[in-house]
């Protein structure tokens, strides 16, 4: 076992004591429902044992990975988490957006026990704010640092792009052995890779994609000589294929890159070039920025010995975690809410619920608020025919219930078997009554309709509020 | 109605030009004919094919991204002269979004490249600076007044159908028509051809171009029937009545689409 060499890493008595107190603090902070419950134990532990972060991360058999950059840290970390977990690794992450160093300590505190203070995970995956990078690498020696992008932060927390970049650079310089995974299309990020031994770049290589608007606040010059950059192609903001005519600084050649990109209202497909291999990427996420996040995760996990094909296979099913699938009991019937947001996911859910012992009725909810996508045309790419066969009655609800009814008509569902009730909770009550006691009611719903149903169920005490 | 009557639909480039469920339009056309006991044949045309367009009673071309447009532009251009000739003789056509743009004289992309169009509509398309995205409502009263024949059946009087067309637009290209009166109709909600909320789409004889997707025909059954009437007229040279269909569900979706478009517009104004 490669674990052996980590067994000599000694957890100091001081750190053990700090853990004990921090665990107490975590317990009481949860009991008292105090805000910031995640950061408090970390704060205490850090005070009591300044070396706690160093000591605990050094015991991880697969080391520590740091993900930083302005946008995409959480999605990229989640993607990496999924890929690594699918390989059988136990992954420790700092959740809940607490990505100051004390958030990292909190995550470690939660994961270790007093009997065995070593964290039980194999690898730590830390999201670190750009400004915290110098602190973070002063305490942790990561084996890999991933930088997603550097944009002007809307809250103006760190100042301009150059200030942010220099903070990241300081953090990177303190970790000379770390492999770097960098966005080749972001000049500021790409410049971080100069003079480094191990750098892997990712980027886009699609001739059909262009930024639709001129960059505004993110207009940047060459990070090396500050003269204007020439963009042969710009994807969005300052991401693209760039070249400095004065000093010759140019976009590095990425190892992981995407072509044939197709972006749907809630779907991404592309051909990923990984070295000399061409692999299909299909994702239920949306937007070019999420494609960058997926490529980042593929590039980074390849450095961690996961082959890109396995990574892409795992990422196909990746969805934002909140509200994906939820059960509740209402009037003695079990309701199951399935979040649907794109044709691929919708088809999967339909296949799934139709294959089960389906029951007499199902509830379909379609909203067209911005978070659902205001364009509902995507439902015409969904195959509803299995529902028409499996369920006797379909109740349709939401702001676009009428559109769903029309879609079902073209899927061969007789309109006598469709009930249109735009009000979500009224529809839920009708649907529940159509299901026998102890049977299951399947609810297929878009995002804001799910939130509204949840809120109604919370008011009735059927569901608990999300504790996020 | 005798089952021997029917129409032949040519679906142009379904693999390259099918954004936002546009293929659903062909499903609607076929379904509305089948329910009236007409036969429907659909021929799909791909780049490299040699379609016999003289057999066509209706052309359909869906939307596509730059990529799709580039892949088919040259092949479509070769068919252009024949299509223009057939449209002049009354062949109905529906071209949506990116397909609509290719039915104009040319498309200038953001690169400054120019893609040739087939000039069914006298106008041109250029890349705009902003993207037009949102629900659209068009007043198409003039269009439907000009084509009263579809409502010749007393069971489906004109009054039972709206004069509006509804759909969703998502385009950065802007289309400028030579003759402003050849629009499909003035925009009630949305951006339209030029992005300025003036006019939407284009009509020449029985050929219709529009930025509306959704797809456009399910929620606008009166537009579907207008095209189908023209297709029968093109095929048989005389008026053939279309039996009325139960469009309750269609028209409810139409009404809700108008309400949602107006609600979104109100919300936008309040934010300003
Ligand atoms: Zn330079």
Image (cartoon, coloured by chain):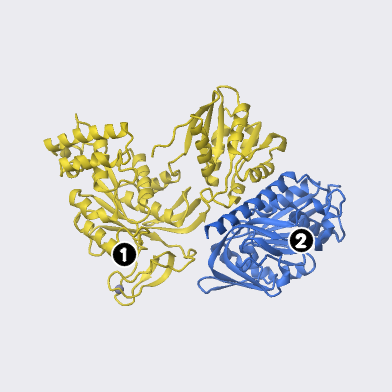
Chain letter, colour blue: B
Instruction: Out of B49 and A209, give the one closest to the viewer.
Output: A209
Judge from the rendering whether residue A444 lies leftward or rightward of residue A32; answer left or right: right
* Residue at point 49%, 29% (across, down): A462
Q: Can residue B47 be seen?
A: no
- Is label 2 within 8 A of ligand 1 (CB to nearest ligand atom)? no
Count the numbered circles shown.
2
Give percent across and percent down for residue B231: 79, 58
- Classify mark 1: helix, strand or loop: loop
Instruction: Out of A104 and B35, give the one closest to the viewer.
Output: A104
- Classify mark 2: helix, strand or loop: helix
Q: Which chain carries label 1?
A: A
Give percent across and percent down for residue A363: 59, 35
Q: Is residue B110 above or below residue B138?
A: below
Judge from the rendering whether residue A287 lies leftward or rightward of residue B41; answer left or right: left
Q: Name the residue under label 1.
A: A160
Chain letter, colour yellow: A
Q: Mark 2 lies on which chain?
A: B
Image quadrant where one finds the C terminus of chain A = top left
Answer with the quarter of the image where residue A125 lies: top left
Give percent across and percent down for residue B236: 85, 59
* Residue at point 36%, 48% (across, down): A74
Label 2: few (<14), some (14–19) or many (≥20) C-alpha neighbours in 10 Å = some
**Label at residue B141:** 2
Q: Can residue B178 be seen?
A: yes
Same chain under badges 2 and 1? The reply is no
Instruction: Out of A282 and A395, give the one closest to the viewer.
Output: A395
């Amino acid at each position: 076992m490669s674990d052996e060499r980590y067994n000599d890493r000694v957890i100091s008595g001081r750190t053990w004591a700090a853990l004990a107190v921090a665990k107490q603090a975590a317990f009481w902070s949860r009991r008292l429902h105090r805000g910031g419950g995640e950061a408090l134990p970390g704060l205490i532990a850090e005070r009591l044992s300044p070396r706690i972060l160093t000591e605990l991360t050094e015991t991880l058999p697969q080391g520590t990975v740091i993900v930083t950059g302005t946008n995409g840290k959480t999605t990229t970390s989640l993607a990496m988490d999924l890929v690594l977990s699918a390989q059988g690794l136990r992954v420790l992450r700092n959740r809940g957006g607490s990505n100051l160093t004390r958030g990292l300590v909190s995550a470690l505190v939660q994961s270790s026990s007093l009997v065995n203070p070593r964290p039980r995970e194999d690898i730590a995956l830390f999201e670190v704010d750009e400004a915290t990078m110098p602190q973070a690498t002063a305490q942790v020696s990561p084996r890999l640092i991933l930088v997603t992008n550097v944009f002007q932060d809307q809250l103006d927390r760190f100042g301009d792009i150059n200030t942010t970049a220099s903070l990241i650079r300081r953090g990177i310089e303190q970790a000379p052995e770390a492999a770097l995974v960098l966005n080749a299309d972001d000049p500021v990020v790409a410049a971080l890779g100069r003079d480094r031994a191990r750098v892997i770049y990712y980027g886009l290589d699609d001739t059909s994609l262009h930024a639709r608007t001129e960059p505004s606040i993110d207009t940047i010059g060459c990070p090396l000589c500050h003269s204007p950059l020439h963009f042969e192609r710009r994807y969005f903001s300052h991401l693209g294929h760039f070249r400095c005519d004065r000093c010759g600084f140019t976009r590095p050649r990425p190892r992981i890159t995407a072509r044939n990109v197709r972006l749907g209202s809630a779907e991404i497909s592309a051909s990923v070039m990984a070295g000399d291999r061409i692999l299909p990427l299909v994702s239920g996420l949306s937007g070019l920025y999420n494609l960058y996040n997926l490529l980042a995760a593929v590039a980074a996990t390849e450095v961690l010995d996961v082959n890109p094909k396995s990574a892409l296979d795992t990422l196909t099913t990746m969805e934002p975690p909140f509200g994906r699938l939820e059960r509740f009991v209402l009037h003695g019937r079990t309701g199951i809410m399935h979040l649907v947001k794109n044709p691929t996911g919708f088809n999967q859910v339909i296949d799934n619920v139709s294959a089960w012992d389906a029951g007499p009725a199902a509830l379909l909810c379609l909203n067209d608020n911005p978070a659902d996508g205001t364009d509902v045309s995507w439902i015409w790419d969904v195959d509803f025919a299995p529902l028409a066969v499996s369920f006797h009655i379909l109740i349709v609800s939401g702001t676009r219930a009428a559109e769903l009814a029309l879609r079902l008509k073209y899927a061969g569902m007789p309109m006598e078997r469709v009930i249109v009730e735009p009000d979500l909770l009224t529809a839920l009550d009708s649907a529940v009554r159509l299901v026998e006691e102890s049977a299951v009611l399947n609810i297929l719903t878009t995002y804001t309709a799910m939130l509204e149903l949840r809120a109604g169920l919370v008011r009735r005490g059927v569901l608990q509020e999300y504790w996020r | 109605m005798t089952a021997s009557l029917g129409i032949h639909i040519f679906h142009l480039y379904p693999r390259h030009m099918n954004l936002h469920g546009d293929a659903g339009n062909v499903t609607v056309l076929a379904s509305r004919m089948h329910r009236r006991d007409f036969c429907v044949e659909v021929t799909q045309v791909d780049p490299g094919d040699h379609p016999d367009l003289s057999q066509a009673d209706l052309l359909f071309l869906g939307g596509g991204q730059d990529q799709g447009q580039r892949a088919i532009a040259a092949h479509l251009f070769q068919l252009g002269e024949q299509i223009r000739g057939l449209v002049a003789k009354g062949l109905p056509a529906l071209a949506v979004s990116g397909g609509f743009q290719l039915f104009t004289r040319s498309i200038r992309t953001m690169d400054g490249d120019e893609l040739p169009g087939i000039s069914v509509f006298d106008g041109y398309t250029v890349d705009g600076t902003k993207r037009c995205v949102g629900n659209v409502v068009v007043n198409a009263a003039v269009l439907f007044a000009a084509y009263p024949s579809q409502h010749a059946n007393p069971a489906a009087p004109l009054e039972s159908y709206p004069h509006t067309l509804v759909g969703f637009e998502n385009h950065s290209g802007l289309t400028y028509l030579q003759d402003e009166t050849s629009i499909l109709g003035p925009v009630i909600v949305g951006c339209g051809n030029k992005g300025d909320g003036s006019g939407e789409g284009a009509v020449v004889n029985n050929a219709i171009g529009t930025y509306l997707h959704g797809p456009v025909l399910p929620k606008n059954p009166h537009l579907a029937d207008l095209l189908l009437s023209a297709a029968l007229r093109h095929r048989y040279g005389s008026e053939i009545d279309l039996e009325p269909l139960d469009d309750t569900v269609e028209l409810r979706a139409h009404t809700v689409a108008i309400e949602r478009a107006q609600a979104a517009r109100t919300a936008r104004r309040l934010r300003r």
